[in-house]
Image (spheres, helix red, strand yellow):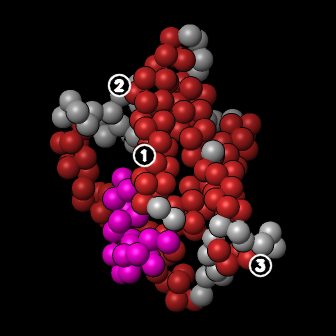
């Protein structure tokens, strides 16, 4: 798999998200589209498009369309007990790192080049204070709003699956063949 294709897919996806968040969302808001639909459309659409693209690339590699081959190629491996320790440890480290790095996030968010759009609520905008427990999410009341939860959570989980399918499942094994132990760093830099 060529470097150019990887750069192209990472770059196009990142650019679509960037321009959607900074330009597309405000445009839709001006046209009367609620923030929650405008923002998440531009965040999810490029990411969800990775699902058919990863399957197309899988096909172009000449892989057989069997469930076992798909699971192996995209590295859908069951988690071992040791893996669960790593997952729990990573969650704990992430929580503490988020708390520890909060001042750094605020510093960077104040720089014009890195400033989040003003419409973004906390925690997506480090310059805005998050109330706990939150009473609304992107302008939508949360109290007894089961419709939003039943729509939002499955869509968000599917978007995360699409992202992982491409970056970790499809590209990472290729990068590991090229970069060895440094593949995670390369993948992370491209993702960032």
Number of the front mark, 2 or 1? 1
Query: Which badge, 3 or 1, comes first in the chain's sequence?
Result: 1
110 vs 6, nearest the viewer: 6
Number of the front mark, 3 or 2? 3
Write down the region rendered in magenta. Answer: 174-192
State the separation of the CA atoms marked 3 and 1.
Answer: 30 Å
Label 1: which secondary element? helix
188 vs 69, nearest the viewer: 69
Q: Is residue 68 magenta?
A: no
Q: Residues within 10 Å of mark 3 (few under 14, many from 20)?
A: few
Query: Which badge, 2 or 1, comes first in the chain's sequence?
Result: 1
Main SS, magenta residues: helix
Check the image and report above or below for 30 versus 36: above
Q: Contact (CB < 8 A) between labels 3 and 1?
A: no
Q: Contact (CB < 8 A) between labels 3 and 2?
A: no
Residue 26 visible in rendering: yes
Query: Which badge, 3 or 2, comes first in the chain's sequence?
Result: 3
Check the image and report above or below for 156 versus 27: below
Which numbered circle lies on residue 118? Answer: 2
Q: Tell me which residue sits at (49%, 44%) in the image.
A: 13
Q: Tell me which residue sits at (72%, 41%) in the image.
A: 151
Spot occupied by residue 192 in the image (x, y as percentages of width and height): 36, 53
99 vs 26, nearest the viewer: 26
- Residue at the spot of label 3: 68
Which numbered circle lies on residue 11? Answer: 1
State the separation of the CA atoms marked 3 and 2.
Answer: 46 Å
8 vs 132, nearest the viewer: 8
Spot occupied by residue 123 in the image (x, y as percentages of width and height): 40, 42
Label 2: which secondary element? loop
Spot occupied by residue 40 in the image (x, y as percentages of width and height): 56, 35
Label 3: which secondary element? helix
Spot occupied by residue 122 in the image (x, y as percentages of width and height): 40, 37
């Amino acid at each position: 798999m060529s470097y150019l294709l990887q750069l192209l897919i990472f770059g196009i996806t990142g650019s679509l998200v960037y321009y959607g968040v900074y330009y597309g969302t405000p445009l839709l808001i001006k046209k009367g589209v609620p923030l929650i639909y405008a923002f998440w459309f531009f965040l999810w659409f490029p990411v969800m498009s990775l699902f058919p693209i990863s399957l197309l690339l899988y096909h172009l590699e000449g892989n057989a369309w069997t469930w076992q081959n798909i699971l192996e190629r995209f590295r859908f491996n069951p988690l071992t007990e040791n893996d669960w320790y790593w997952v729990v440890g990573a969650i704990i480290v992430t929580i503490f790192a988020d708390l520890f790095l909060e001042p750094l996030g605020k510093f960077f968010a104040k720089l014009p080049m890195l400033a989040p759009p003003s419409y973004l609520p906390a925690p997506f905008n480090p310059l805005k204070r998050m109330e706990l427990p939150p009473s609304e999410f992107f302008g939508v009341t949360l109290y007894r709003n089961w419709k939003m939860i039943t729509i939002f959570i499955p869509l968000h989980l599917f978007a995360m699956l699409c992202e992982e399918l491409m970056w970790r499942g499809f590209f990472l094994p290729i990068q590991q063949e090229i970069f060895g132990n440094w593949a995670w760093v390369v993948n992370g830099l491209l993702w960032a």
